[in-house]
Image: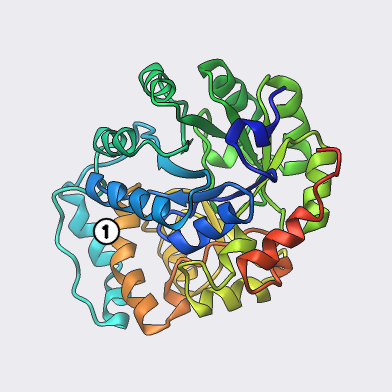
Amino acid sequence: MTDLRALFGIEHPVVLGPFGGLSSVALTAAVSEAGGLGGYGLYGYDGDRIRTTIAALREATARPFAVNLWLPRGDEVEPNPQHSVFAQALQPFYEAVGVPVPPRPDRYLPPLDEQLDAVWEAAPPVLSVVFGVPGSEIMDEARRRGIRVVGTATTVAEAVALDEAGVDAIVATGLEAGGHRVSFLRPAEESLVGSVALVPQVVDAVGVPVIAAGGIADRRGVAAAFALGASGVQVGTAFLATEESATTDGHRDAIRSTAADGTVLTRAMSGRLARGARNRAVRAIEASGTIAPFPMQNWLTGRFRAAAVEQGLGELQSLWMGQAASLARHRTAAEVFAELRAGVPEAR
């Protein structure tokens, strides 16, 4: 099996999880500069912003990095008359932050083709994808441009599908992970497999390097991942809590103070299942029983979440974090990376 370090041209098999909406050039570059693979989430970015972002990453580091795209699942809704109904249901949150109920936009997300055109033009070293299997056109174009492709699986069946599509590596993400559950073959609620069970089964089922994700925040988690057969680890929450990330101090404090049983899987904030803190917004939206489908719900809550960030109102934000959140004890990306690197077996 290809060594992950040789595959990506990195020194240490540690990957930064890409954060949709919370990625920063500083954090991505810091992980790459430390010898790992920095990751940057491009969720919601149009073509121009993707080009600008990748240019900024190249300016910040000469080392390899990855950018991440969400593949369409086919169940995404376009703006429609129901928009106003779901918007009104969230009116108390708009009032709480002093913003008007948002009118229906022309679109919720840029089309994948627009995003891919920008990625192909900028040609980042690595493209990672979630919520599906990259088609042959994506794989062929990536190979033509020398871009490595990484897929993400929450079940063994998903990993096998990615392997058959020809991806270069697979992230096996356990239910412990923070943020969205990126399942695509079955509903996310039916694809909740823990990392300890998932990683070795994926390793046995595929022929490409497997990157373990979910519940890894220190050297112990890294060592466990390698003992399970992983070729590397992907870490999100521990890096999200660092000063280089794009999140708020309130989010960082929430991460460090949340116990293993303090997170919840919810569709409240985006319309898709995701793991984060059970704050006021999550509780109230779940109790209302009114949650728009994705990406309508994500766009609608995003209008008050952005204002809540500016006003320091953590109870009205999406406080994404994994079950190992309280193990995120380091303040800088360099400190987190050193801790994780200490768990990598010397033989690797």
Residue 268 place in picture, x, y as percent: 44, 59
Along the line of sight, the residue nearer the viewer: 284 or 193? 193
Quarter of the N terminus within the rendering: top right
Which residue is found at the position 52% from the left and 79% from the top?
250
Left or right, 276 with respect to 256, comes to left
Q: Is residue 210 above or below residue 53?
A: above
Left or right, 340 with respect to 143, comes to right
Left or right, 303 with respect to 65, comes to left
Colour style of the rendered protein structure: rainbow
Residue 209 place in picture, x, y as percent: 67, 29
Residue 31 place in picture, x, y as percent: 58, 56
Q: What residue sits right under mark 1 in the picture?
A: 86
The three-letter code of the residue at mark 1 reads Phe
Which residue is found at the position 53% from the left and 62% from the top?
320
Can residue 328 be seen in the rendering of this structure? yes
Which secondary structure lies at badge 1?
helix
Residue 304 place in picture, x, y as percent: 31, 71
Q: Residues within 10 Å of mark 1 (few under 14, many from 20)?
A: some
Corner quadrant of residue 3: top right
Along the line of sight, the residue nearer the viewer: 35 or 227? 35
Along the line of sight, the residue nearer the viewer: 321 or 28? 28
Corner quadrant of residue 330: bottom right
Q: Is residue 137 above or below residue 60?
A: above
Corner quadrant of residue 309: bottom left
